[in-house]
Image: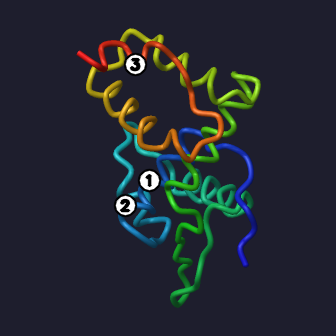
Amino acid sequence: MPRRPSGTLTEAELRIMQILWEKGPGTVQQILDCLMQKPALAYNTVLTTIRILEKKGYVGHSKDGRAHVYLPLVQQMEATRSEIRHLVGRFFQNSHDALLLNILEDRGIAAEEIARLREMLDRDGSSNPHPIQDSRLHEGKDQ
């Protein structure tokens, strides 16, 4: 059984994981070919980053002849949730409410996104013992 992923992903690690999630398993060279970076990264840089991802539990490998073929051990949604848990713990004192309120206070949030959040909260409110109550989600609802 693969170990539970640890730590958060750096930008370079995330780019490699996104390639593995989108394209599937690949060799270092195949991953390097998918990285659209200027200037191009060195083969050893990509290999080192993949080895770090292996130590963190995000990536595994199998042998195909002499080559190692790397594959994601963690689904993208699991990695996303792990990053969100880290964010909530680090910046919001483990308060999901504080994170959501911060998002709602961001003036860049679109009305469609607020409507989707409102719909999700209305649908999920009955099963959640602590539904979020915030007037900004309910403004103009009965209009």
Question: Does residue 120 lie above or below 108 as drawn?
Answer: below
Quadrant (top left/top right/bottom left/bottom right) for the N terminus: bottom right
- Near mark 3 (Cα within 10 A), the count class, few <14, some 14-19 or many ≥20, is few
Task: Give the labeled residue for mark 1.
Answer: 18
Point out residue 14 in the picture as x, y percentages from the top left corner.
Answer: 52, 46
Find residue 138 and name its label: 3
For this rendering, which residue is in front, 126 or 22? 126
Point out residue 54 in the picture as x, y percentages from the top left corner.
Answer: 68, 63
Q: Kindly indicate the quadrant of the structure image that contains residue 20.
A: bottom left
Between the residue at mark 1 and the residue at mark 3, the CA separation in whole angstroms equals 36 Å
- Residue 63 placement, left or right of 57: left
Instruction: Please tell me whether mark 3 sits on a helix, a strand or a loop.
Output: helix
Question: Which of marks 3 and 2 precedes in the sequence?
Answer: 2
For this rendering, which residue is in front, 106 or 12? 106
Between the residue at mark 1 and the residue at mark 2, the CA separation in whole angstroms equals 6 Å
Point out residue 126 in the picture as x, y percentages from the top left corner.
Answer: 52, 43
Task: Give the labeled residue for mark 2.
Answer: 22
Residue at 36 percent of width and 18 percent of height: 109
Q: Which amino acid does label 3 sit on?
A: His
Residue at 52 percent of width and 76 percent of height: 69
Q: Determine whether label 1 and label 3 are within 8 Å by CB.
A: no
Q: Determine whether label 1 and label 2 are within 8 Å by CB.
A: yes
Find residue 84 and name its label: none
